[in-house]
Image (cartoon, rainbow, N blue to C red):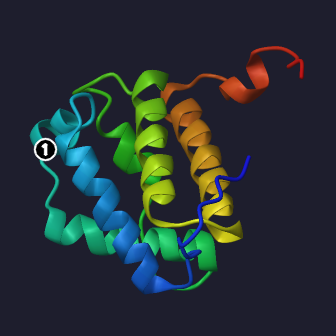
Amino acid sequence: MATESVGKPDLAGRPDIERLVNHFYGRVREDALLGPIFNDLAKVDWDHHLPKMYAFWQMALFREGNFHGNPLVAHAALLPLTPMDWPRFNRWLELFHGSIDDLFSGERAEHLKRISEDMAHVIHARINGVPDRRFSAGPRVG
């Protein structure tokens, strides 16, 4: 479902990705659930992580850029340190979608929400060795 907002542009390129990623990770760093994972357990080097995320989301949305990495390995490495359960992935999605809505509106913004939701479900299922919850909860009504 599209979240339309007058006066907000759609994502148009790398500068918008950088703006979104910076806004999002600012929220993550302050979040009661996710902040400690990034700041204390993973001890994220933000100067290294943010450019990698710019490249990742640029590749995911615009099919361009130079992302190199394996998100599954990065997330699985956290399993010995913290649960990588659905509530954490869901909180990540809430913050990511909220960040998109704070800054952007349009087809690409909505597409990026769908991409991020797909990725969250796949990464959660793969690193935890469980079925993708979208397909394991039985038929949906409505």
Task: Classify residue 12 by image quadrant.
Answer: bottom right
**Vertical order, 139 against 18 (above or below):** above
Q: Seen in the image, is 36 located left or right of residue 133? A: left
Percent from the top left, x then y, of residue 109? 61, 64
Relative to the observer, which residue lies in front, 15 or 41? 15
**Vertical order, 12 against 99 (above or below):** below
Task: Classify residue 141 by image quadrant.
Answer: top right
Percent from the top left, x then y, of residue 37? 21, 36
The residue that appears at 38% across and 38% down in the rendered structure is 76
Q: Seen in the image, is 21 located left or right of residue 127? A: left
Residue 110 in view (yes/no): yes
Percent from the top left, x then y, of residue 38? 21, 44
Q: Give the labeled residue for mark 1.
A: 39
Instruction: Tell me the quadrant of the picture where the C terminus can be found.
Output: top right
List the single residue furthest toward the front: 6
The residue that appears at 59% across and 74% down in the rendered structure is 10
Percent from the top left, x then y, of residue 57? 49, 69
Q: Seen in the image, is 71 located left or right of residue 120? A: left
The residue that appears at 54% across and 73% down in the rendered structure is 7
Secondary structure, mark 1, is: helix
**Vertical order, 125 against 70 (above or below):** above
Dot 1 alpha-carbon crowd within 10 angstroms: few under 14, some 14 to 19, many 20 or more: some
Three-letter code, disc 1: Asn
Relative to the observer, which residue lies in front, 1 or 64? 1
**Vertical order, 17 against 34 (above or below):** below
Residue 85 in view (yes/no): no
Relative to the observer, which residue lies in front, 105 or 132? 105
